[in-house]
Amino acid sequence: MKSKVAERIQKETPEEERIFVRQYTDIVLRINQILMAKGYTQKSLAEKMNKRPSEINKWLKGNHNLTLKTLAKLEAELGEPLIYTSKEQLV
């Protein structure tokens, strides 16, 4: 059961913001799953990508907007897809 405050906040939050938060969270969870499966740390990923560990941390904490270019670099380095398009899901 939601509180009245939570319901009010949800009603006042624009739909695009809720979608953004949901998608960003899904992407970060996927990245963390891959890191764990491959035995990578944020530090080792940073080294592989020639980035500072603090930048990787910002990506995974939601403090920095992930661009499509960054997502492509992450996918290439991790060797796993992070996002799926509707076309890919149909295959």
Image (tube, rainbow, N blue to C red):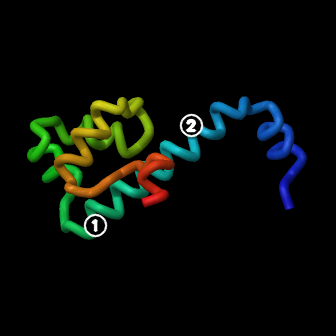
The numbered dot on residue 7 is none
Q: Which residue is mark 1?
A: 36
Q: Please say if 30 is above or below 83.
A: below
Tell me which corner region of the image, top left, top right, bottom left or bottom right, holds residue 78. bottom left
Compared across the picture, whether 30 is left or right of 77 comes to right
The amino acid sitting under disc 2 is Phe
Compared across the picture, whether 55 is left or right of 5 comes to left
Please tell me which residue is depicted at 17% across the width and 49% down the height of the picture: 77
Viewer-nearest of discs 2 and 1 = 2
The amino acid sitting under disc 1 is Met
Q: Please say if 37 is above or below 46.
A: below
Q: Residue furthest right?
A: 4
The numbered dot on residue 20 is 2
Please tell me which residue is depicted at 29% across the width and 31% down the height of the picture: 69
Q: Nearer the viewer, residue 82 or 55?
A: 82
Q: Please say if 60 is above or below 52.
A: below
The C terminus is located in which quarter?
bottom left
The N terminus is located in which quarter?
bottom right
Q: CA distance from mark 2 to mark 1?
A: 24 Å
Please tell me which residue is depicted at 47% across the width and 57% down the height of the picture: 89
Q: Tell me where residue 53 appears, x and y as whole percent.
A: 20, 41
